[in-house]
């Protein structure tokens, strides 16, 4: 049976600003892609309230380190997401590391938005580390998720300048504004079959359809990556 829509499950931990940007962009594009569910590891995540206001089903999978280790949590999380039958899983401010117990259930179907120009500044506090390093350009990256943190094949990046007098907050806000444009564009491209992963042994890279290079709204640029 051919599906008439492309179901996206978004994982969040907090306010869900990227979730909001994604939902609004897909609605405006009148796309077959839709955020069909939102999953959080925190019941108090503000993004859940936005999802409920939009009529999007929500689910909470709490991470209690006293009862579940990281691998067990990922297995429970994978079970919850699998029941939602996603075509794509988007990590949008999800502050938990997803392990092989999760990723093996959704091969080539999990993407993340990270606030740096990967492979620079993987992990936490990317904006702070960019400032401390003295770089002149920072930015954000949409990438497929691999077992190594922030090391999966890169789909798209957006650069923003580091301005004189920037602190972590001001740079972070500028990067976040870029994320709100880049993530929806990348997800829409994936849903339309314009993004593919090419595997070669243990490595992989992303290939973008040629039409994206001339799309002024997408402005996607792949620089490869490893898996």
Image (spheres, helix red, strand yellow):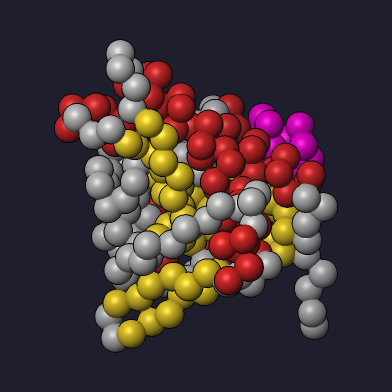
Q: Residue furthest top?
A: 165
Is 18 or 84 nearer to us in this picture?
A: 18
Rendered position, 113 above or below 101: above
Residue at (41, 41) in percent of width and height: 159
Residue at (34, 37) in percent of width and height: 138
Image quarter hosting the N terminus? bottom right
Rendered position, 52 above or below 3: above
Q: Would you say residue 6 is visible in this rendering?
A: yes
Q: Would you say residue 72 is visible in this rendering?
A: no
| First to last magenta residue range | 48-60
Residue 15, horizontal then vertical, whole percent: 54, 28
Magenta-span inclusion, residue 76: no
Is 40 or 163 nearer to us in this picture?
A: 163
Image quarter hosting the C terminus? bottom left
Residue 65, horizontal then vertical, whole percent: 31, 42
Q: Residue furthest front?
A: 214
Is 42 or 208 nearer to us in this picture?
A: 208
């Amino acid at each position: 049976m051919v599906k008439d829509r492309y179901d996206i499950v978004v994982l969040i931990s907090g306010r869900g600003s990227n979730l909001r940007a994604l939902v609004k962009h897909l609605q405006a594009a009148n796309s077959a892609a839709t955020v069909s569910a939102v999953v959080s590891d925190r019941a108090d995540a503000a993004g859940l309230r936005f999802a409920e206001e939009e009529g999007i089903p929500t689910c909470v999978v709490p991470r209690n380190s006293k009862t579940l280790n990281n691998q067990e949590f990922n297995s429970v999380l994978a079970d919850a997401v699998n029941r939602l039958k996603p075509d794509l899983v988007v990590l949008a401010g999800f502050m938990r590391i997803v392990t092989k117990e999760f990723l093996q259930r959704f091969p080539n179907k999990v993407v993340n938005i990270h606030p740096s120009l990967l492979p620079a500044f993987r992990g936490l506090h990317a904006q702070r580390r960019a400032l401390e390093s003295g770089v002149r350009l920072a930015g954000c990256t949409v990438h497929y998720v691999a077992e190594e943190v922030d090391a999966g094949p890169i789909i798209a990046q957006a650069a923003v300048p580091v301005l004189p007098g920037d602190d972590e907050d001001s740079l972070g806000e500028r990067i976040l504004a870029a994320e709100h444009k880049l993530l929806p564009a990348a997800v829409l491209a994936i849903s339309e079959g314009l993004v593919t992963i090419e595997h070669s042994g243990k490595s992989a890279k992303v290939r973008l359809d040629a039409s994206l290079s001339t799309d002024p709204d997408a402005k996607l640029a792949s620089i490869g990556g490893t898996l």
